[in-house]
Image (cartoon, helix red, strand yellow):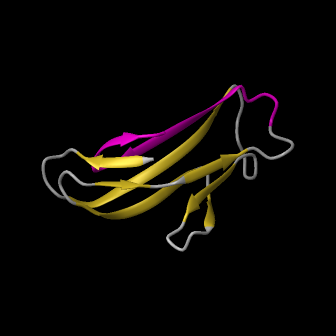
Amino acid sequence: MTVLNTTGGDAEDATDNLSVAAEGGTLSGGDVNVSLLAEDGSWRPIGHTARLTTATLPAGESRTHRVRISLPEGFPASVTRLRVTAFSKAGEETIT
């Protein structure tokens, strides 16, 4: 996930969030494994709805969060699709 500050000024305390939601069913704890790559190179488990960071993002600058999503055995068969949403108070978000 990449966040680009398109607000025209510094985005003070810009919060970046990620949400993984189910279509066709519901998710409960353990149905989806979501991890965030930490600065030390390790993968840190996060929830399927999580705040990734809150920090100032200068005008025109960007920051990238690396997220890994995996489905364990026993994933609910009723879930037909996962919807991944990224959002930030800093302007524009993209998921690649």
- Residue 29: % across, % down: 72, 52
Above/below status of 79 relative to 19: above
Above/below status of 37 relative to 17: below
- Residue 62: % across, % down: 30, 53
* Residue name at image x 36 percent, y 63 percent: 54
* Residue name at image x 45 percent, y 43 percent: 86
Res. 27 image quadrant:
top right
Instruction: Looking at the picture, tell me which residue is in the foreground, 53 or 94.
Output: 94
* Residue name at image x 61 percent, y 69 percent: 42
- Say if the magenta span includes residue 92: yes
* Farthest-out residue, left: 8
User: Bounds of the magenta span?
Assistant: 76-96
- Residue 68: % across, % down: 62, 51
* Farthest-out residue, right: 74
Instruction: Looking at the picture, tell me which residue is in the foreground, 84 or 94.
Output: 94
Above/below status of 31 relative to 43: above
- Residue 53: % across, % down: 42, 62
* Residue name at image x 58 percent, y 42 percent: 20
